Image: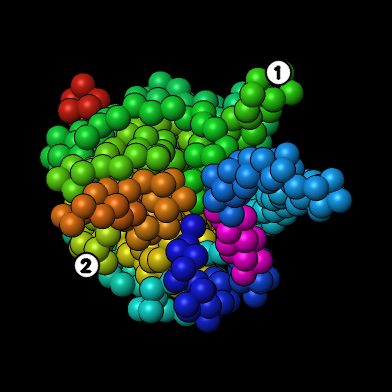
Amino acid sequence: MIDLKDLRDNPDKYKDGARAKGVAVDIDRLLELDTQHRALLAEQESQRATQKKLSKEIGPQIGTLRKQLKTVPETHSSEIESQIRELEEKPLQLKNRIAELDEQIAAIKPKLETILLAIPQPPDPDVPPGTSEADNVQLRTWHPNWFNPSKSFVDNKGFAPRTHMQLAEMHNLVDFERGVKMSGSRSYILTGDGARLHQAILRLAFDFITTEHGFVGCTVPVIVREEMMVGTGFFPAGHDQAYHIEESKRGSGHDLFLTGTGEVSLMAMHADEILSADQLPLQYATVSTCFRREAGAAGKDTAGLYRIHQFDKVEQVVICKADETESRQWHQKMIGIVEALLQKLEFPYRLLQCCTGDLGPKNADMIDIESWMPSRGDVDADGNPAGAWGETHSASRLYDYQCRRLNLRYRNDQGKTVFCHSLNNTVLASPRVLIPLLELYQNEDGSITIPKALQPYMNNQQRIG
């Protein structure tokens, strides 16, 4: 959620920001509703002040008039009785007007909040303009000395590559057919060494972020209330991507949603809290099962492990002070952690600066990290894919956008409560990350060399097949 006061002062900043992100939202209508809302609140406050003052004054006034009734001639009593009735009616008139204002405020508030929640965070000024991922800008690349993505797979390794699906079938690593039988498209079963690799790489990533980089490991719920999805900025825009559990239809008081990332619960832990400045920064990590409907992705990456409904992810979150410089420093540090992990695994990767149109509503800035996947890209006349980059990580800087929605604050050195800043990043998501692992580390005979960094997590196994 954006700062409404800042929007009143700088409406063009938010109009331009929404336009840059391709988000249609009526900010003029919001300002109109906001003006009406504040006018109603001001009148209500004035009426309540009058009501409070009147309650102190009216009793003595009526008492005085009743005493006068006993002494004045009967010809003047009707006038005094009229004054008494008028005084007695004033509290009722005020009460009725306050009730009317309550109804008007209650009617306007949800309209105001609906638009307010839909306004995206404006992109930072240094984010390049663009309309889609096609306009993202490559920042840098890295590769191990044994595999250079600028060369063909054959030039790198001396033989034509198999896809991860072919390798999975060859070594009984994944059962796609039974997964689809059980749960429909984009489903799978990891089996044997496939399941072991999946668990090993998640454990490596979790140990790396917690033991080597000091993040506090957490096990968090993956089923949350709707307000937590709204609070973290995934609703309303991402409503169609979440799995909905309609508990209210079973008599429960609220519906629930399956989270698409551990970020939701890591951030929601401190919703409606006021932290002390010396608690910050909070550095959290979790490994959790994630669920995404992949609505709108029909026919796109339906085969294999790239775009699936259920996966496991190690996520990192930082909650820090409201300081742009500190937020930017954490953003770079979190990206550096992931780069170090990918270099440990010896996966070729590149960093992409996301353009304005690819940021998403909640991000002021976002850097994607893509790993090289030999089975992606265009296919030649012999059926061999050229290879291409595929997204495996995404690091976001959100400033106070999430914390404002979650009402997550800290008390600064002056004793003032301030909304925190937040950042998040994928440490590693599996089984998607198994695509580059299987395909890059395959050998000519179809066997797969297990990366050295993973071997301790595989009981020192060095090879599959």
Q: Quadrant of the C terminus?
A: top left
Q: Which residues are magenta?
A: 35-49
> On the rendered structure, is 30 left or right of 332?
right
465, above or below 252, in the image: below
**Residue 377 percent across, percent down from the top left:** 50, 61
Q: Secondary structure at mark 2?
A: helix
Of residues 203 and 444, the one nearer the viewer is 203
Nearer-N-terminus badge (1/2): 1
Q: Is residue 271 magenta?
A: no
Of residues 303 and 308, the one nearer the viewer is 308
For image coordinates 26% across by 66% down, the residue present is 324
Q: Which residue is mark 1?
A: 251
Please state the total of marks drawn on the protein image: 2
For image coordinates 39% across by 51% down, the residue present is 403
Q: Is residue 185 visible?
A: yes
Q: Marks 1/2: CA distance?
A: 48 Å
Of residues 26 and 233, the one nearer the viewer is 26
